[in-house]
Amino acid sequence: MVKVNFAEIKDFEPLPVGRYHFAVTDVDSGETGEDSKKPGSPYWTAECKVQDGPHQGRNQNVWIGLPPNYEPYGMVNILRVSVGQHQWTEEQLKDGEFDVEMDDLLGLEFVGIVRKQRKSKEGYTEIGRMEPYDPDTWEPEDEDSSLLP
């Protein structure tokens, strides 16, 4: 038997629009369902955790569609921000093929920009852009920060 205290469960509100310092804490694989545009296509889901600021500890998933059924944009984006943190170089990303394992993404730190909340039954946000994380220049946003002018 497992005891669950529902009083301790926090709101599942989407992350507000903003810039966040994330780290990849888990990566899982799957296949798209029968109702998807490309049924049976492989993908990875990277669980990313906010590292500081008022939303520290919150999770945001990044869906990465894998070739050959999906263009490798999501993968290239997450690998691009990893240059300097892992074994890949800019030249490798531009010049040729190389193997990437799910575990290669664990611990990857990046700045993710949440630009909009998507409208759906559940309501969720997506990381619209990723940038390399530089601990020397990063400053967490406060609760009142906004990307709006």
Image (cartoon, rainbow, N blue to C red):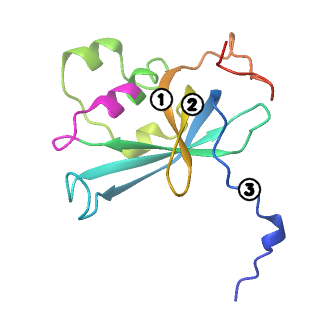
Q: Is residue 62 above or below residue 111?
A: below
For badge 2, the amino acid type reads Val
| Side of 127 relative to 17 (left or right) | left
For badge 1, the amino acid type reads Gly
Nearer-N-terminus badge (2/1): 2
Residue at the disc numbered 1: 128
Local crowd size for mark 3, using a 10 Å CA cut-off: few (<14), some (14–19), many (≥20)? few
Residue at left 42%, top 29%?
78
Between marks 2 and 1, how big is the CA–CA gap?
6 Å
Residue 32 magenta = no
Tags 2 and 1 in contact by the CB under 8 Å rule?
yes
Local crowd size for mark 1, using a 10 Å CA cut-off: few (<14), some (14–19), many (≥20)? few
Magenta part of the chain: 67-77
Residue 11 numbered mark, or none:
3
Q: Position of residue 24 (x, y in %)?
A: 54, 40
Q: Residue furthest bottom?
A: 1
SS category of the residue bearing label 3: loop
Nearer-N-terminus badge (2/3): 3
